[in-house]
């Protein structure tokens, strides 16, 4: 198994006026290809800061970060943009869809920045990606014509359209109800099973449980790095038993139109 | 709410029984990250679609440039048109001409006030006609002009009467519409014959039967031998509105123009045509020397009682003046174009501010700084380009309307159009750079967080 992410002593200090905020104070970990990792921690502990570093949207104050063998701090700006475009799919908590454009156009946007694909092929691949997240019927809708869960699925389709090796999601279920969250997590699980490395930030243990590994952050430091299977078991052996895994529950209600699709065409 | 305050349940995860499938997505072949990237046609499409998304703002912003370009184009067309019509009316009198007039020259080479003592006489013209003294002259034409009341039947009008010799038409580029010009014989004999200008002919003989008819001037009867073709140039003093009689007839019979000094007749002007345009300067100095000799004036020119006007230099002066005027007007119009450019910059800055989150998102999705820069530059260029093209159309329409109204002559030209359009695009580029740079340099995280 090869290493996807290698973080060494990452720090990030924000300078606001005279005040320095040490959002990350030295975090080190490795994530292998094909892992499914949840990052948890109290508000303000530095989760988003860490995700932005992993997603090459920000650069660390110190420390080194290697993504898929590329030393990120050595890369020139245009290359960094290419890395963001081709290796990473980023799902934002606030969706960040372009309001003027249809779902299809939103999803096709990263392919435009990738280049080398004619417009109709881009739209074809975007449509494929939307079908994978179960939005084949809603391609021509503008974001405000979609529900929150549907918008989040458009955002995921956009993150998947370039077939990235790494999917990052910062609180993807933050704006969703339980049922939609379960659907979404089922989708991420399927993507992970088909080989995609998935890293997500969440506040909810229910969501984190879908992952296989938990990174817990506190005050900018890595507090715990454990398999999710042990994370809660260790602390509370008497927790009520769930009837089935969340994925299976979601499947049983028939709200996961995606799995086979994705695997076949990926 | 912190994670640890939540009720903890035993984790039950999808068992990782099957080892994750071969990372088929991630295992894409190693590709060169320098390769690819968005092409400019796609970027242009993005720019145009964001302009379309806000049509009113786009139109109002382009309006500034539109008005600037329209006024530049219209003013240049009008300026060039009037320059062309002035040039035409100067050269309509004939080419390579030197005109001798009575009166000392002013320092600028333009005729000063006519002194009482200064006069030109027929004898002066004869001296100039001597090929020995003025070898570079092709024709010498002494002319006398006055005004007279013309009567034909029940019609009458006041017209300028020019007394001239038979060389007049070849010197002044006149052709005859009908009949003939009078001959040297008519001039020697002081014959009562007249050649009518085109407008005079139509006014006095509306039926068009002027040839051979009688016209009365100052109580004498003149036979119409010819009618000049319209010179078309129009303007003040055009021969279309005058008539021509033999010089001797004018001097002796019509106006009795005996010179104040000497025993000759005075003439109004002596027009000399140089043999070619290269010989104008030589002819000019020969004419001056010949006249100084003839009139016993100091040879250094200090006592000249006449002045010689070079048509070519007048033309140059007039051309220069109208060109200056045209440029001046165009420069004022260009200032409004500049103001339009500031309007573009203003809107682009607002647009970058408004679309901060969009820019952040695009960068997060893989847009390079250059891509964002280009997108916003295309927007300001499209604004100025569309404004420029519409302004070109509007300015041309204004110019054509002015031309059609007959108030002024206009002349649309491709180079003026390209100049105005190019300047508009340059304005768009110049005022677009700062907003585009500020957009391109936005930090994706900060931009995405922007409210
Ligand atoms: N752009 C910024 N400028 C200054 N300080 C910042 C900035 N972004 C984050 N911080 C600070 O860094 C710390 C970590 O922020 P971060 O957003 O990473 O927290 P988080 O773990 O994602 O919190 P939450 O769960 O609320 O999203 C916080 O104290 C925050 O105030
Ligand atoms: Mg956060």
Image (spheres, rainbow, N blue to C red):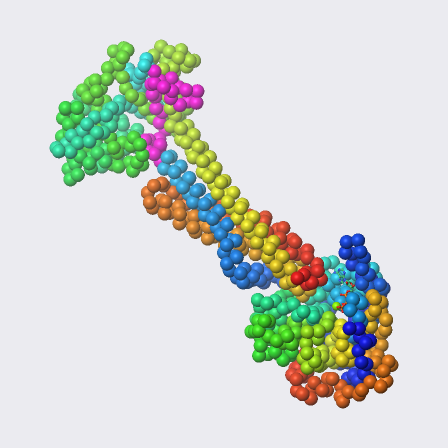
Residue A195 visible in the picture: no
- As displayed, is residue B399 above or below residue B278? below
Asked if residue A41 lies left or right of residue B90, the reply is right
Give the quarter of the figure containing the C terminus of chain B.
Answer: bottom right
Residue at 29%, 16% in the rendered image = B121
Residue A119 forms part of the magenta stretch: no
Give the quarter of the figure containing the N terminus of chain B.
Answer: bottom right
Residue at 29%, 38% in the rendered image = B232
Instruction: Using the rendered view, name the quadrant where residue A207 is placed.
Output: bottom right
Q: B374 or B313, which lies in front?
A: B374
- Measured from the top left, where is residue B366 in percent x and y? 68, 64
- As displayed, is residue A133 above or below residue B345? below
Instruction: Using the rendered view, name the quadrant where residue B156 is placed.
Output: top left
- Measured from the top left, where is residue B86 in percent x and y? 37, 35
Asked if residue B189 lies left or right of residue B298, the reply is left
Instruction: Using the rendered view, name the quadrant where residue B111 is placed.
Output: top left
Displayed-image quarter of ligand 2: bottom right
- Measured from the top left, where is residue B275 in percent x and y? 36, 27
User: Magenta span covers which residues?
Assistant: B88-115
Q: A211 or B138, which lies in front?
A: A211
Residue at 24%, 15% in the rendered image = B258
Asked if residue B210 lies left or right of residue A224, the reply is left
- Measured from the top left, where is residue A111 in percent x and y? 64, 68
Q: A84 or B197, which lies in front?
A: A84
Specify the farthest residue to the left: B153
- As displayed, is residue B125 above or below residue B38? above
Q: A94 or B321, which lies in front?
A: A94
The majority secondary structure of the magenta stretch comes to: loop
Residue at 56%, 61% in the rendered image = B50
Residue B234 visible in the picture: yes
Q: How many marks?
A: 0
């Amino acid at each position: 198994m090869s290493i996807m992410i290698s973080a060494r002593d990452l720090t990030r200090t924000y300078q606001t006026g005279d005040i320095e905020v040490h959002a990350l104070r030295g975090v080190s970990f490795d994530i292998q290809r094909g892992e499914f990792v949840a990052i948890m921690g109290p508000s303000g502990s530095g989760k988003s800061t860490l995700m932005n570093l992993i997603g090459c949207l920000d650069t660390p104050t110190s420390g080194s970060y290697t993504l898929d063998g590329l030393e990120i701090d050595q890369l020139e700006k245009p290359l960094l943009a290419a890395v963001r475009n081709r290796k990473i799919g980023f799902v934002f908590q606030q969706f960040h869809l372009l309001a003027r454009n249809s779902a299809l156009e939103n999803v096709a946007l990263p392919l435009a920045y990738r280049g080398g694909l004619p417009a109709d092929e881009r739209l074809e691949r975007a449509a494929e990606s939307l079908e994978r997240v179960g939005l084949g019927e809603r391609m021509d809708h503008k974001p405000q014509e979609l529900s929150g869960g549907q918008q989040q699925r458009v955002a995921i389709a956009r993150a998947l359209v370039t077939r990235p090796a790494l999917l990052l999601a910062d609180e993807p279920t933050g704006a969703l109800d339980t049922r939609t969250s379960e659907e979404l997590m089922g989708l991420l699980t399927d993507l992970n099973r088909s080989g995609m490395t998935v890293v997500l930030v969440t506040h909810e243990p229910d969501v984190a449980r879908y992952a296989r590994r938990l990174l817990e952050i506190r005050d900018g430091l890595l507090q715990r790095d454990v398999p999710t299977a042990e994370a809660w078991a260790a602390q509370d052996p008497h927790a009520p038993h769930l009837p089935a895994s969340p994925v299976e529950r979601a499947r049983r209600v028939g709200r996961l139109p995606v799995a086979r699709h994705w695997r076949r065409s990926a | 709410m912190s994670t640890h305050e939540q009720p903890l349940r035993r984790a039950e995860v999808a068992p990782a029984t099957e080892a994750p499938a071969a990372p088929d997505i991630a295992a894409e072949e190693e590709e060169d990250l320098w390769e690819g990237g968005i092409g400019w046609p796609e970027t242009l499409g993005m720019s145009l679609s964001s302009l379309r998304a806000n049509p009113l703002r786009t139109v109002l912003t382009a309006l500034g440039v539109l008005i600037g370009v329209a006024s530049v184009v219209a003013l240049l067309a009008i300026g060039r048109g009037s320059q062309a019509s002035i040039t035409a009316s100067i050269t309509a009198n004939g080419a390579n001409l030197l005109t001798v007039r009575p009166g000392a020259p002013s320092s600028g080479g333009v005729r000063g006030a006519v002194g009482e003592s200064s006069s030109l006489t027929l004898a002066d013209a004869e001296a100039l006609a001597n090929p020995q003294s003025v070898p570079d002259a092709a024709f010498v034409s002494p002319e006398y002009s006055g005004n007279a009341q013309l009567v034909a039947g029940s019609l009458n009008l006041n017209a300028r009467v020019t007394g001239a010799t038979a060389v007049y038409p070849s010197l002044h580029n006149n052709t005859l519409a009908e009949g003939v010009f009078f001959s040297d014989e008519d001039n020697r004999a002081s014959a009562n014959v007249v050649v009518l200008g085109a407008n005079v002919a139509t006014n006095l003989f509306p039926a068009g039967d002027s040839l051979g008819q009688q016209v009365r001037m100052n109580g004498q009867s003149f036979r119409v031998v010819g009618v000049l073709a319209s010179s078309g140039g129009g303007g003040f003093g055009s021969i279309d509105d005058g008539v021509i009689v033999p010089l001797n007839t004018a001097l002796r019979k019509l106006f009795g123009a005996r010179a104040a000094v000497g025993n000759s007749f005075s003439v109004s002007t002596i027009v000399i045509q140089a043999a070619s345009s290269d010989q104008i300067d030589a002819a000019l100095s020969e004419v001056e020397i010949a006249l100084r000799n003839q009139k016993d004036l100091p040879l250094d020119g200090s006592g000249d009682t006449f002045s010689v006007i070079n048509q070519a230099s007048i033309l140059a002066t007039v051309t220069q003046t109208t060109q200056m005027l045209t440029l001046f007007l165009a420069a004022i119009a260009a200032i409004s174009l500049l103001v339009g450019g500031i309007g573009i910059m203003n809107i682009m800055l607002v647009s970058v501010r408004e679309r901060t989150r969009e820019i952040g998102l695009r960068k997060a999705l893989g847009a390079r700084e250059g891509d964002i820069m280009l997108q916003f530059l295309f927007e300001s260029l499209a604004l100025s380009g569309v404004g420029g093209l519409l302004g070109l159309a509007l300015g041309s329409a204004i110019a054509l309307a002015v031309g059609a109204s007959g108030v002024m002559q206009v002349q649309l030209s491709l180079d003026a159009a390209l100049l105005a359009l190019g300047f508009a695009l340059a304005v768009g580029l110049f005022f677009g750079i700062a907003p585009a740079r500020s957009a391109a340099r936005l930090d994706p995280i900060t931009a995405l967080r922007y409210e």
